[in-house]
Amino acid sequence: MKLTKRSIYIYLVIILSIAADQISKIIVRANIIGRTDVHPGERIPLIGDYFILMNVENTGAFLGMGSDLNPTLRLIFLLILPILVLGFVLRHILKDKTLDNWSLFAFASIIGGGIANVYDRIVYGSVTDFLYIDLGGIFRTGIFNLADMSVTAGMIILLFVSFKKKKTA
């Protein structure tokens, strides 16, 4: 396949998503997990009690779902299936020339975040989650990482693009 500006854009977004996630996890593993004075699940305030750094090794998927599956099902649902889906989505966005730049960015962000978390599962057996937001009970997240943010941002962008297309149609 010939590299075009479009495909370079797609690969660049994927690579930057993976890199940002993996670099952040390297920093967290070195500075949080490696410290003897910080225990798993301990809260380290970054911005008061609103933006908190924690270390959780997640053996499941989103919010720990699937962590109680037997090893065979976990392999299928948390490794094999995501790899296949990410591969099909990548193939789709490389072939579908009608997708706008926002959709390409969104799909590439989802692929990059997905690959980053799959990589963690393969190499470490779990995904390092470390960010938590609590806006005084008004808004509270689960513990997440930058790969999760890439996937979530990609999904939100796709929703906006979808609504915009329906509105103009």
Image (tube, grey):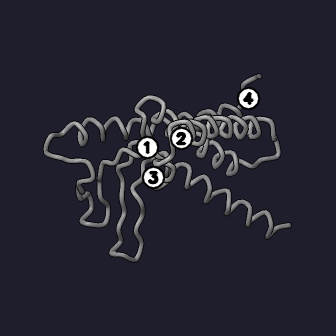
Distance between the alpha carbons at the discs numbered 2 and 3 = 12 Å
The residue wearing badge 1 is 59
Between discs 1 and 2, the one toward the N terminus = 1
Q: Which mark is residue 74?
A: 2
Three-letter amino acid code of the residue under disc 3: Gly
Callout 3–callout 1 Cβ contact below 8 Å: yes
Distance between the alpha carbons at the discs numbered 2 and 4 = 37 Å
Distance between the alpha carbons at the discs numbered 3 and 4 = 39 Å
Q: Which mark is residue 16?
A: none
Distance between the alpha carbons at the discs numbered 3 and 1 = 7 Å
Callout 3–callout 4 Cβ contact below 8 Å: no
Three-letter amino acid code of the residue under disc 4: Thr
Between discs 3 and 1, the one toward the N terminus = 1
Between discs 2 and 4, the one toward the N terminus = 4
Secondary structure state at the residue bearing disc 3: helix
Callout 1–callout 2 Cβ contact below 8 Å: yes
Residue 78 horizontal side relative to residue 45, left or right = right
Between discs 2 and 3, the one toward the N terminus = 3
In the displayed structure, 4 sits above or below 138; it is above
Residue 130 horizontal side relative to residue 104, left or right = left
Q: Quadrant of residue 94?
A: top right
Secondary structure state at the residue bearing disc 2: helix
The residue wearing badge 3 is 64
Residue furthest to the top in view is 1
Q: Would you call the spot at circle 1 few (<14 residues within 10 Å), some (14-19), or many (20 or more)?
A: many
Between discs 3 and 4, the one toward the N terminus = 4
Q: Which mark is residue 4?
A: 4
Distance between the alpha carbons at the discs numbered 1 and 4 = 38 Å
